[in-house]
Image (cartoon, rainbow, N blue to C red):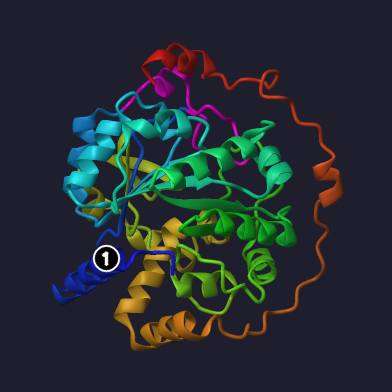
Amino acid sequence: MGVPVSQMWTVASYVLGQKLRGRKRFPLVLMLEPLFRCNLACAGCGKIQYPANILKQNLSVEDCLKAVDECGAPMVSIPGGEPLLHPEMDKIVAGIVERKKYLYLCTNAILLKKHLSKYTPSKYLSFSVHLDGPREEHDLAVCREGIYDVAIEAIQAAIDAGFRVTTNTTVFNNSEPEKLREMFDTLMGMGVEGMMLSPGYQYEKAPDQEHFLSRDETFRLFRRILDKPKKSWVFNQSPLFMEFLKGNWKLECTPWGNPTYNLFGWQKPCYLLQDGYANSFQELMDTVDWDAYGRASGNERCQDCMVHCGYEPSAVNATFGTISGLFASAVGVLLGPQANKKLPDLPPKASPSPTTLVNLTLPSRESAPKPHFETQASKEKSSV
């Protein structure tokens, strides 16, 4: 397992405590977004498509820590944008670690080496570095040449400095299983603690709409990616979620499991959908019609979603809330993944040619088109 025993114990105790109190809905991970701007403009990202005046803004340290206290979840994830662009990110991290919350600071790693000296290694802090495949695939996904090499160098520097380092990989329908498996070998050889995988969500505002996965495509692709996994591979995810991605375990979405707090407040209903905002965490929990979301609801936007922020809490809940889930998780840890169940036959579907994708010419870091918020990021360079 790619999760320290102390963290597993904290999460298990928290979940069991909530269940003993009879609470049906409770948060597992706070998704804290202190800013939206980024120093990349990835084709599959729908989180950075805001006007320039919004991209200039940051949440204050006080607002971030208030949200952590208000939510009460045992874990915090800081996605982006690029969190390391926040001029006081080190203070936000220090406050969360002081509260003994397990924190995953997500980053594309462009600024990681430069900023490492601002942070102190802790069992509560993990840098979660975004990698969408080996060199050519990752640079294509982030639309900038050379970023894979920058990330790998930063990962090694963080590991050498004593930090916990994990990776997160978004999988699309042009992902090549064999190349991803090669990347797994590379990361494990470097000493990465654990890897996280998730199919991409179909953001309406993402520039690239062609490469998102349908539910059935997800099952088939993840079966190829995770076929006969090597013992050396360590995934920072629950066994039931991994089986869910392969179509071997049924889970319904838990949209309240990873609540999101950002510049606009508490986002309804989840990290991926924006159906308004609440002024407080309690208002979020009380006012959202939770039955209107998730695949079982029939909501069109939820039908192909299998993203970790909605289903990892479901997997954790099943692990500690059902005998079958606990048994299946234990078997997965001790004996490895279960045999794949039969999937319904589907007509063949043409997919983009990997050769065509690899032959695309990427701009260099110097000549790459800059996001429309690059000017503001440059202005803040001295303070970051």
Q: Split into 4 quadrants, where in the image is the N terminus?
A: bottom left
Closest to the observer: 240 or 230? Answer: 230
Q: Residue at x 36, y 83 (%)?
A: 326
The percent position of residue 170, horizontal first and vertical second, equals 58, 51
The percent position of residue 251, horizontal first and vertical second, equals 46, 73
Span colored in magenta:
38-58
Closest to the observer: 360 or 186? Answer: 186
- Quadrant of the rendered structure where residue 369 is? top right
Task: Label 1: state its secondary structure.
Answer: helix
Which is the main secondary structure of the residues drawn in magenta?
loop
Residue type indicated by callout 1: Ser
In the rendered structure, the answer to whether residue 149 lies left or right of residue 61 reads: right
The percent position of residue 375, horizontal first and vertical second, equals 51, 13
The percent position of residue 325, horizontal first and vertical second, equals 39, 82
- Quadrant of the rendered structure where residue 178 is? bottom right
Q: Looking at the image, can residue 65 be seen?
A: yes
Q: Is residue 258 above or below residue 114?
A: below
Q: Looking at the image, can residue 200 be seen?
A: no
Q: Is residue 172 above or below residue 356?
A: below
Taking the magenta stretch, the answer to whether it contains residue 40 is yes
Q: Is residue 205 above or below residue 14?
A: above
Neighbor class of circle 1 (other Cα within 10 Å; few <14, some 14-19, many 20+) is few
Q: Residue at x 30, y 60 (%)?
A: 28
In the rendered structure, the answer to whether residue 302 lies left or right of residue 44 reads: left
Q: Residue at x 52, y 38 (%)?
A: 154
Q: Residue at x 49, y 37 (%)?
A: 47
Q: Residue furthest front?
A: 160
* Residue indicated by mark 1: 6
